[in-house]
Image (cartoon, rainbow, N blue to C red):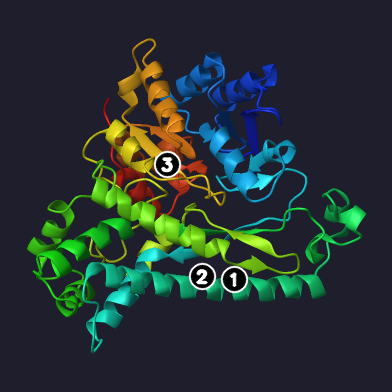
Amino acid sequence: MPDGLAVGVMVGGTDAEGADITHELSYLCLEALRRTRLIYPTVGVCWHKRTPRELSDLASELMASGCANPAFFNDAVIRRGLERLGLPPADACNYINSTCVEITPVGRSNVWVASPYFSLCRMLLDEIAAQAGAAEAAADFEAFLTAYFKRLGTAIAGVVAHQSRLREDRRRFGRKPLQSLFTRDCVERMRDIDDGGALTNWVECSFVGLANLADSLEVIRAEVFETRQLTMAELKRILDDDFAGHEETRQRFLNKHPKYGNQVERVDALVARVAGFFTSECARHRLPPDDSPFVPGTFCWVMHERLGSECGATPDGRRRGVPFADGGGPAQGREKGGPTCAILSTTSWDHSALIGGLAYNMKFPGDLFRAPGAHGRLRELIETFMARGGFETQVNVVNRETLLAAEKNPEQYRDLVVRIGGYTDYFTRLSPGMRREIIMRTEHGI
């Protein structure tokens, strides 16, 4: 099965004055997905409050029919984030997703995306180990969180220094004369794109495992500091053993403590605090040669599976090697209150600074939208997510039984397309770990 070109297409959106620019081609780009069923090009709908109902309906109807390719991006949220980074309105309305969910201003950019991926939970385990062996451990949860933030801040500063060295290497030994000719304002500045000639030169990093971190922090707050059922050293030993001999404790961590995605304010607030910290910490740093910003995101690609495979057990009840959450939404299978509740949690904090990308995945059984007009319920959910400030959402409409059958008999399902952590791929050619991760996701009813 051919892939098609690895490019993204965006339709809808607004012009510099905020007027809708939906065009006949907007509908044709979406309709082409129905006829090709390729994984590329992707088509993103740049949604805003004046987006024509017909465009939202067409994208939602395609999703409801099992076409995983379309995605909805929040035009107002993205424009607000781009303007915060210094883009004028005429350029902030002209952006593209870099085939996934990372945002790049069109025609003026030398943007490096997903550089690098931070494993939030790996750093949490390092902090637990440090606290367990400390002569004077944190006296309360706020002190523990402060220590974790210090560790995360140090990691961010180290990565910025590394990226700065890479930029200097590209400046000295690189050069892209043809690309520079077509990128503003390399010619006017008489500088190659590798020498900072582009108007936009920022680096977009990604923070992976945000939901797992928040769920883990909630368990630590309750178990170690509030009820004092465990010491930090005892918690470390349980995690080091991957819960061997402690299944009852794992079930308590997993099921007796609230989880992100269920509209529980104390957990949602932890997500907001963590995102607020790394957003402000990234904003402190600038990169050479033109003091360009270090821009955060929670885009995962396949790194939630890869980084999860490299990380030990975590206090949220996750076992060693299990994938992390796949973006900015809840961890797989933990949203118990249905899709509306999960949307309310996911949009309870500000997404606009995450120009590095945020994906929110929803999954529904394939027979849910078979009735005529049933896709309207899906459109209403998506528009609720958008209206509340969600950055991007994508949907898999496929039965769990179909996924299991495709895993068992891949040759019979070579054209089964699914959404991953911002991008689209054929299910049967994913790694075994990624296939399991897709199957693990909560399957919502409405």
Residue 312 in which image quadrant: bottom left
Q: Amino acid at mark 1?
A: Val
Mark 3 touching mark 1, by CB under 8 A? Answer: no
Left or right: where does residue 99 sit relative to residue 90? left
**Residue found at x 16% / y 62%:** 222
Residue 306: image location, x then y, percent = 42, 62
Q: Which mark is residue 360?
A: 3
Looking at numbered disc 2 in the image, what kind of residue is underneath it? Answer: Ile
**Residue at the extreme bottom of the image, as rendered:** 135
Task: Give me the residue at 79% from left, 55% from top.
Answer: 198
Viewer can see residue 103: yes
Dot in front, 3 or 1: 1
Three-letter residue code for mark 3: Tyr
- Report the front residue among 372 and 114: 114
Verify CB contact (< 8 Å) between mark 2 and mark 1: yes
Is residue 37 toward the left or the right of residue 383 in the image? right
Q: Is residue 139 above or below residue 328?
A: below
Residue 99 lies in quadrant: top right
**Residue drawn 65% across and 41% down?**
96
Percent coordinates x, y for residue 413 in the rendering: 42, 36
Question: Where is mark 2, residue-wise?
Answer: 156
